[in-house]
Image (tube, rainbow, N blue to C red):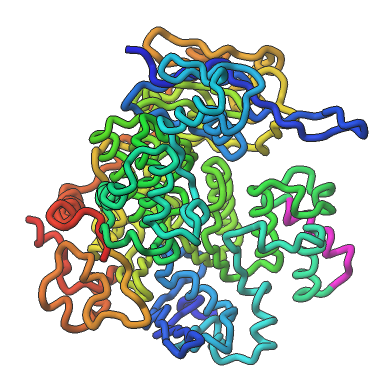
Amino acid sequence: MTAGPLIEIEGLRVTFQSDDGRMTHAVDSVDLSVANGATLGLVGESGCGKSVTSLAIMGLLPKQSAAVSGAIRFDGFDLLDVPDATLRDLRGNRLAMIFQEPMTSLNPSLTIGDQIAETILRHRGGSRRAARERTIELLRRVHISSPEKRIDEFPHKLSGGMRQRVMIAMALACDPQLLIADEPTTALDVTLQAQILDLMRELKAANGAAIILITHDLGVVAEVCDEVAVMYAGEIVERAPVDELFANPQHPYTVGLLGSIPRLDRRTSHLATIEGMVPNMANPPAGCRFAARCPFVEDACTRSPPPLALLSATHASRCIRAPLERLVS
Amino acid sequence: MTALLKVEGLVKHFVAERSVFGRPTAYVKAVDGVSFTVEAGKTLALVGESGCGKSTVSRLVLRLIEPDAGRVTFEGRDLGALNAEQLRAFRRDAQLIFQDPYASLNPRMTVSQILTEPLALHNLVPAAGRRERVEELLRLVGLEPRFARRYPHEFSGGQRQRIAIARALAVEPKLIICDEPVSALDVSIRSQILNLLRDLQDRLKLAYIFVSHDLAVVKHIADRVAVMNLGTIVETAEAQALFAAPRHPYSRALLSAIPVPKPRARRSRIVLEGELPSALNPPSGCRFHTRCPYVIARCRSEVPQLREDGTGYATACHRTGELPGAEAILPSDGGFSPTLEKLVAAFNAAEASGRPGVIS
């Protein structure tokens, strides 16, 4: 195996066509790469395109209405260009995904054991008995108590945190090389969230799998990610190693996001707010997509779309006014 | 100063199972002996995990459901003794804002109709003046008056929550119960709504009961905090004191589980193992003992009482005082660099110069 990244996304574009013929650009020229054993955080607010990006990687976007272009290279395959049968062999096997809603993503009429074993039997084959043993082992690994009994229970008997752990067990069934977790803790209480995050860290250490963690919570990102990509209106606006992003953010949107988190270390009377709204993606603005909400905007920002420019070897920002520190000194 | 709202020994058990003859055989002890007070113009936060009874408490306070035992007094009046007409008058003084702004506004009514309804119901403003009052309310929550003719589906989540707040404000209440008002909103919108709630409190001297599971938000908005676990309050204190040094092991676990937006933050963590016990069959003794890292034999048999230490800090734990210090639970060094501090301030300056929160 080569030392290059496990997955490399280049110029990913996703456009949805609505019934009345309007085109919405959900994801625009996204470049990303994740190395083996690394965790990438994909951060942004509702509608910024982070979930669409992950569905594009998994090949789960509806073919009739979504036009996907660019390249997604995963271990020698171009996922946008492989036959459906190959994709089905990869999904659940070497590519796995955890969804936000554990209630709606588990089948209520099958026991959790059957649902996990289904994945094992599809990709690994073998006997039902072996699959059952593997399932029990997986449930134990995600810290479900007395897995021999739980394996025959239906999803409705389990609490939210347990369901999410079942989802994780299912995703891990075939030791995937890439795990995409779409807001895996958003629906959970803080105490459960801490358990799930610990579990993800543990698994990364044990399996060396790469993880793409999609979240809107910068606290979660700081706890588990190595690298972060911030998305806004379908584009990556900033990309940096996690320490660098929190210490020295170089896109105004990232600054606004950091400022809008209530502080735990001291009491502030006012939180930063990002005024205005996300632009309409059926008709994106000509210049920088954040310009209308940016406190540092100047004329040049609205003329042409800014490139994602490297500020250092690892830190890139889509802002022509970066480095930002000179604006306030 | 007398409290605006006083809650004493509130109990609510829901019937979970009945025998074939209809006799109840099992109860969910949703709220089991809860007491607290809310001062005028202040914010009390009710904190706890899903199913701890915090939403049930907020409904009991408004008498939307009837308690099995206990007393709620508002400005000295016992709410349990009110007849239907008096209860309606009380509802002018206490309002409720829900979590989901998509579900709490009637999709068939325009914003103007939504805001006029409480005015007409309580006969507050003569019909001729209502339109003006609606415009005033919209301005108060940072929306443009011309939005009055639109329907809820035309607004974003944050704007809808502003409309829900305007509706609550229409009757000029003294107390607003906010049940997870920002949980469904994006981070940047969340900060707008939190700022708005703060501003309104300062301007209109509102008291809030703020129900939330998000402790970072609670720290930002609350004056006083009550931590609930399985239907009981385990700790209550001034927000500052509680966040500086939480005493109850459950409060410590909750606080230590908040993800901090600072990579490699140094802190001691208490990760709770095991599942949240069911309120249908709560553990004996202290209800937290099954998950508590400091459990001793006494915790399993004897229910700890909520004891106040003389400074307004009350904890229900047998081992208060014996536990190790709690300094490292919240990081004290989570601050921004001076440059980042200035960059963030630029966002606030832009807000101050522009129209606050108005979206055209």
In percent of width and height, residue B89 lies at 45, 29
The relative height of residue B238 versus residue A246 in the rendered view (above or below) is: above
Q: In which quarter of the image is the N terminus of chain A?
A: bottom right
Residue in the picture at 38% in, 52% down: B163
Instruction: Let me know if residue A135 is in the magenta part.
Output: yes
In percent of width and height, residue A87 lies at 64, 84
The relative height of residue B14 versus residue A135 in the rendered view (above or below) is: above
Q: Quadrant of residue A317?
A: bottom left
In percent of width and height, residue B158 lies at 38, 56
Farthest residue, direction top: B310
The front one of A204 and B254 is B254
Q: Can residue A259 be seen in this view?
A: no
Farthest residue, direction left: A329
The front one of B44 and B342 is B44
Viewed as shown, does residue A15 lie left or right of A89?
Answer: left
Residue in the picture at 76% in, 31% down: B15
Viewed as shown, does residue A281 lie left or right of A304?
Answer: right
From which residue to which does the magenta span run?
A126-139
The relative height of residue B230 versus residue A90 in the rendered view (above or below) is: above
Q: In which quarter of the image is residue A313?
A: bottom left
Q: Main secondary structure of the magenta part?
A: helix
In percent of width and height, residue B79 lies at 52, 21
Farthest residue, direction right: B20
Instruction: Let me know if residue B241 is in the magenta part.
Output: no
Q: Quadrant of the C terminus of chain A?
A: bottom left
Q: Is residue B182 visible?
A: yes
The relative height of residue A60 versus residue B287 in the rendered view (above or below) is: below
Viewed as shown, does residue B101 lie left or right of B129?
Answer: right
Residue in the picture at 30% in, 42% down: B334
